[in-house]
Image (tube, coloured by chain):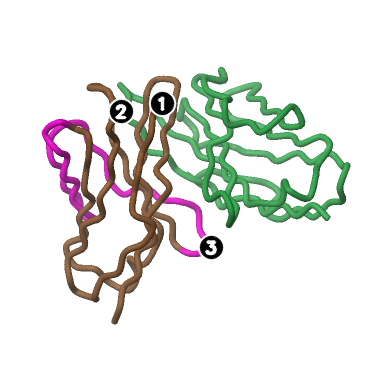
Amino acid sequence: DAKTTQPNSMESNEEEPVHLPCNHSTISGTDYIHWYRQLPSQGPEYVIHGLTSNVNNRMASLAIAEDRKSSTLILHRATLRDAAVYYCIWYSYDKVIFGPGTSLSVIP
Amino acid sequence: DAGVIQSPRHEVTEMGQEVTLRCKPISGHNSLFWYRQTMMRGLELLIYFNNNVPIDDSGMPEDRFSAKMPNASFSTLKIQPSEPRDSAVYFCASSFRLAGSHEQFFGPGTRLTVL
């Protein structure tokens, strides 16, 4: 049974890096890993995605384990605007597998 | 582009009534998703279309829920009859699916309240 797990909540100090983990132990070799975040009272928004190698964009970095059974979303310097629920998602052709989301709090 | 458009933004109805939620995806996108979000259950995928064809509807709660995508620019989610436990925010999202990679763009959501 496909499953994705994430910690329920995490806390970070402002300006500090944040590492948000996700376990996706049943992922197959061709399934991409995506991360989205949802700010309060808004719909989710895309953050980053990857397949095998680490990825960087203006919002974040994505580190994917060599065995692809886990990944980590890295926010290099947390700001108050990064307080949100972060979802790890991966896709098979006919399935969208959602993590439960991690609620990130950023302390000023 | 205006992004994903959902209507109505808010809907209040009474138990037993039919509810129809509408979604216009971003032009050129070939995948469309309907989600439901509640405090208790979080974000749940209801159904996923690719090229207007339902691919995964395993998240549709029961026969009271139905979704259609008659063409690439329009989709509906219907609840008949509605029940108070259907109260939630319903999101529609679209993406251009390419080799297993999606970047979904979400609409603003429809907040449904069933009394």
Which residue is nearer to you in this view: B34 or B95?
B34
Whether residue A96 sits left or right of residue B56 in the image: it is left
Cα separation, mark 1 vs mark 2, equals: 8 Å
Identify the image quadrant of residue B100.
top left
Discs 1 and 2 lie in a common subunit: yes
**Which is nearer the N-term, disc 1 or disc 3?**
1
Question: Residue at 51% of width from left, 19% of height from top?
Answer: B51
Alpha-carbon distance for marks 1 and 3? 32 Å
Up-down relation of residue B106 to residue B111 (above or below): above
Q: Chain of mark 3?
A: A
Residue at mark 1: A1
Nearer-N-terminus badge (1/2): 1
Q: Nearer the viewer, residue B42 or A40?
A: B42
- Which numbered circle lies on residue A26? 2
On the image, the x and y values in percent for residue B114 come to: 79, 52
Instruction: Give neighbour class at mark 2: few <14, some 14-19, many 20+ (Cα, 10 Å).
Output: few
Is A54 contained in the magenta span? Answer: yes
Residue B60 lies in the magenta stretch: no
Front one among A98 and B77? A98
How far from the left and from the top, in percent, is residue A107? 30, 78
Could you tell me how far apart the alpha carbons at marks 3 and 2 are, in whole angstroms? 32 Å
Image coords of residue B7 (percent x, y): 68, 46
Q: Nearer the viewer, residue B95 or A25?
A: A25
Choose mark 3 or mark 2, whichever is in front: 2
| Chain identity for the colour green used in the image | B
Residue type (three-letter) at the residue carrying disc 3: Ser
| Mark 3 or mark 2, earlier in chain | 2
Type of amino acid at the residue the image marks with label 2:
Thr
The residue labelled by disc 3 is A41
Q: Which mark is residue A84?
A: none
Mark 1 closeness class: few <14, some 14–19, many ≥20 residues within 10 Å? few
